[in-house]
Image: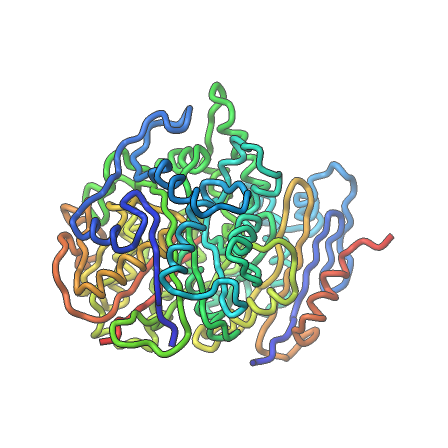
Amino acid sequence: MIYKISDNIISSLGFSSEEVYQKVKSGISLGKLHAGVFPGVEPFYSSLLNWEAVNQETVKLFSDGMKYTPFEKIAILSASKAIESAKIDPSSSSVLFVLSTTKGNIGLLEENGGYEEERIHLWRSAQLIGRFFKNPNEVLVVSNACISGVSAQLLAIESMQLKGYDYAVVVGADVLSKFVISGFQSFKALSNERCKPFDAERRGLNLGEAAATIVFHRGEPSQGDVVFRGGGNRNDANHISGPSRTGEGLYNAIQNAVKEVDLSKLAFINAHGTATPYNDDMESWAIERSGLSNVPVNSLKGYFGHTLGAAGILECIISAHALADNTLLGTMGHDTFGVAKNITINKETKTCCNLMFLKIISGFGGSNAAICFEKLG
Amino acid sequence: MEKKYIHSVVRITNNQLMHNGELLLTRSAEDSSWPVEMYRGLHLQYPKFFKMDNLCKVGFLAAELAMKDVGVSPETEKPDFSVLLLNSTSSLDNDISYQQTIADETNYFPSPAVFVYTLANIVTGEIAIRHKIKGETSFYIQEKFSPATLSDVAELGFMPHKGIREMLIGWVDFLEDKCDVLLFRISVNPENSISEWTDEEVSRWYEAGVQKK
């Protein structure tokens, strides 16, 4: 079986999964309206990283004289914390690294910062992350827009199943830049206040910065471990920047993920819940079509914003911690139900006692993914 | 490990377009728009082509040829079909175009039509839309073309629980007029195939497009 042996989150809420999870449980978010961070860009509501603290933490790590970009710093910081608590040797060839990101070092197009030309390439950052840990395997980058974080977990897990790796370190990270924010603003996709997932008044998404890492192990799990149960990736074949109205691809991805799963054990569905009008409606269609209308659904975007390449990993980590803690997290920002299909949005954090969660996620390019985990009782 | 078979292979370099080993088009001039020239040369009718970025254009063109003899129309839904692509430069060609729209504060005009193509996996989406492909779509990035990685990705794509029978798989790279595409249509069905899928075959088709002096 493949199960999670450790994890880490570097986010606005802290630099360890446990700290971040506890803050989410207490209903804390540090999202706010930012003006003047990137010259020329209109103000935007976001959860940004505390870069001073990141630099303080990472200065201890980097004794190799290599200069790392902010994106690489948080990816390495997150991976090294997760690896440390997993107590594995990252230089072993039985450890696979996978990197999930949408835009990597794209900020270097604006301000090159003295980095070599090839630093703009995603593979170069992946290579440097692998080298930092002296890992001999090539580090593949998964670039599947918003679903990258779940795609990367599936790539890692399937590679373990097929190629026999003992461990996989799945790292996701993205930092915000003028490039990314101006683009989402041009789409009129951003809300200027805290996003409102599945709400009648939802006006768009918030962006956030984070890095997140899960270390998976192929072996015999013990009681309490969170085990991989299934995954799926399906395309809508409908539109490059909008989801299928009826959730076609996401429904198909869910069906693939839950094929061998006992759905009566499902504690909750952690949705993408970006708070854009189309995404949340589409998810309600896919959930209803899957016969899961009565399963509690939450979205974590109100706490972190959409953390792009980190999102699928970060949200699985928080969900796994909630499962372990017998907790059903609330949907910050949600007030009045307002999506197309009658699903069960969980508004407030409360206790719960079931064993599985399903993570769903969709994005540009018509991509959809689903992944299912179970806590061994 | 289930055997896989190559049914169609398309190779596009800076100046040549080949399908199943046959040279179809040669670029007329160094300064022509090579993707548009190929579109015209193949006599295609798909107006959406012109709004695509170069990466999507060359991926779309390769897929048109690779799907030519698939036996069903583009409108037929293909639930057990995947599109799995890799490259080195992601969407950098279009990222540079987008950056130009925001670089100058006095001439700031970020466009959603350009921004949407700043993600490498959009090409998998364009191909999926055109051919109603509803299986898995994924885009991976690595430094250099590697037959071994491509074989691993194909292997993962056909894992039994996914229920996938056929896929478009390959390398689609475009940056500043440098075009490097190798796209296969492969299947678990040997009927009417060109050859079995092996690392050696993949290398051979890639090298077939390397210019010999």
The image shows residue B76 at horizontal and vertical percentages of 49, 65
Residue at x 42% of width, y 46% of height: A74
The image shows residue B136 at horizontal and vertical percentages of 47, 64
Q: Quadrant of residue A136?
A: bottom right
Residue A328 visible at all:
yes
Q: In the displayed structure, does residue B11 sit left or right of residue B93?
A: right
> Is A53 placed above or below A273 here?
above
Q: How is the image coloured?
A: rainbow
Report the front residue among B157 and B82: B157
Residue at x 34% of width, y 41% of height: A207
Report the front residue among B125 and A104: A104
Position of the N terminus of chain A, as image quadrant, is bottom left
Residue at x 35% of width, y 67% of height: A5
Q: In the displayed structure, does residue B63 sit left or right of residue A152?
A: right
Number of numbered discs: 0
Residue B126 visible at all:
no
The image shows residue A278 at horizontal and vertical percentages of 31, 48
Residue at x 78% of width, y 49% of height: B26
Q: Quadrant of residue A192?
A: top left
Q: In the displayed structure, does residue A235 sit left or right of residue B172?
A: left
The furthest residue to the right: B213
> Is A11 placed above or below B160 here?
above
The image shows residue A179 at horizontal and vertical percentages of 46, 35
Report the front residue among A224 and B139: A224
Q: In the displayed structure, does residue A251 sit left or right of residue B181?
A: left
Position of the C terminus of chain A, as image quadrant, is bottom left
> Is A287 placed above or below A223 here?
above
